[in-house]
Amino acid sequence: MTKTAICGIKFRLERFFHHIAYGGQEKGTPFFLSLLLSPLYLLSLFYGLAVNIRVSLFNKGLKESRSLPCKVISVGNITVGGTGKTPVVEYIARQLTERGLKVAILSRGYKGTAHNPVNVVSDGQTIFMEPHQAGDEPYMLAKRLRDVPVIVGADRYVTGSYGVEHFHVDVLVLDDGYQHIKVKRDVNILLVDGERGFGNGHLFPRGPLREPLSNMERADFVLVTKCKKPAQGVGASGFMPDFSKIKAKPLTFCSGYEPLNLQSFWTGNKESVSVITGKKVVTLSGIANPSSFTALIKSLGGNVLHEEAFPDHHAYSPKDLHGVMKKAENLGADMIVTTEKDAVKIEEIDERVRIPFYYLQIGLDLFGDDERFVENILSRCGIRET
């Protein structure tokens, strides 16, 4: 079977999962589909039992949660798929660095080929690894935060200990660390997708939940991502989690994406996002929720002719880019726009695309609540601003 065929099957399975997890199938589900999904439901029960046993062992002290000799901030989610962790991790690391703190980021390095116990992507000055080795998200963070070390490895206690010893950090930020409870943290930030919420509310693999919703009580703060800012600039709209089944409601913030600029693959120059307005666009992405990226391009005034989507964390080939280019040419597109996460892998490919080709850089928009968000993190860590 060819790589293209395997990629196609993987993508269809991924889309099918997202359809049953987030597509509102609970009402009026055809009988044959109910039968098809019943094994997934049974598997989700066993999965939930295993998760609850694991959490209970840590809660009762039968499994050890170990402390690191620095402040630890965890950013993670309770669902599978993208909730926008990378912009949040970058934002926190940047805010703390600007306040004079030495920060390092710890990541699992998902889909990366580096499997040593400790893999230094960047020491804060030099990037030592390629995207396919580090994983696309750790590499992107290393590229955006040149003064912040980025380390990948399966065991965050091991990588964290290395970061403390070799980089003398004040704060470690755990990327996707909500389930990594073997490391104690000073701040536990839970991200919730403001567009898709908790989907059908089932545990994986019947639904998108990594843990029962009652485990939200481990969170110190909840940050709802991908919210929409009303035209009048007051408040924010998006899915809001129900905390009625947990003991205490955590402090909750809302955030959205802030489009920063377009970066040209042709020239390397940065251009204003206003370049998209009125243009015929083909979007290209290999992320968990490609429709979210397409919606962002549309919000900037782009006329999206076609959405070219690949599986999450897709490793692009020259053939992939050639196919996208031909499709864009046939449709009469003015430009192709991809995500920054995809760009770090596309940049490795020597394939000349004749149509203007950009990636969109985004930041985190806390809708004016930045100071309160950062102050609460510092307070929870016991850090006083100087």
Image: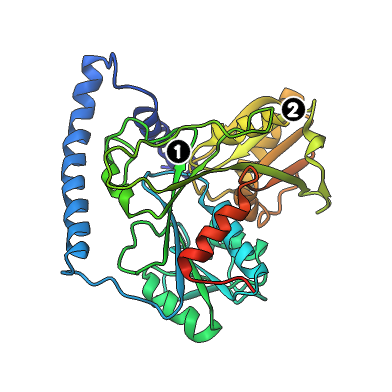
Q: Nearer the viewer, residue 339 or 219?
A: 219
Horizontal and vertical percent position of residue 112 = 48, 61
- Mark 1 vs mark 2: which is more N-terminal? 1
Do labels 1 and 2 touch, CB within 8 Å?
Answer: no
Which residue is rendered at x = 53% and y = 79% of the image? 169
Residue drawn at x 21%, y 40% as measured from the top left = 44
- Residue placed most toward the observer, 162 or 37: 162
Q: Residue at x 39, y 77 (%)?
A: 68
Q: Is residue 163 visible?
A: yes
Q: Amino acid at mark 1?
A: Ala
Is disc 1 placed on a helix, strand or loop?
Answer: helix
Q: Is residue 108 above or below residue 122?
A: above
Q: Callout 2: few (<14), some (14-19), or many (20+) C-alpha neighbours within 10 Å?
A: some
Render colour scheme: rainbow
Residue that mark 1 sits on: 5
Q: Is residue 136 visible?
A: no
Could you tell me residue 267's position as x and y percent?
A: 84, 51
Residue 84's mark? Answer: none
Instruction: Give the CA separation, mark 1 to mark 2.
Output: 34 Å
Nearer the viewer's eye, disc 1 or disc 2? 2
10 Å crowding of disc 1: few (<14), some (14-19), many (20+): few
Q: Amino acid at mark 2?
A: Gly
Percent x, y for residue 152?
A: 47, 68
* Residue at point 32%, 55% (across, down): 218
Q: SS of the residue at dot 2?
A: loop
Q: Quadrant of the N terminus?
A: top left
Q: Quadrant of residue 213?
A: top left
What residue did someone put label 2 on? Answer: 301
Total numbered circles: 2
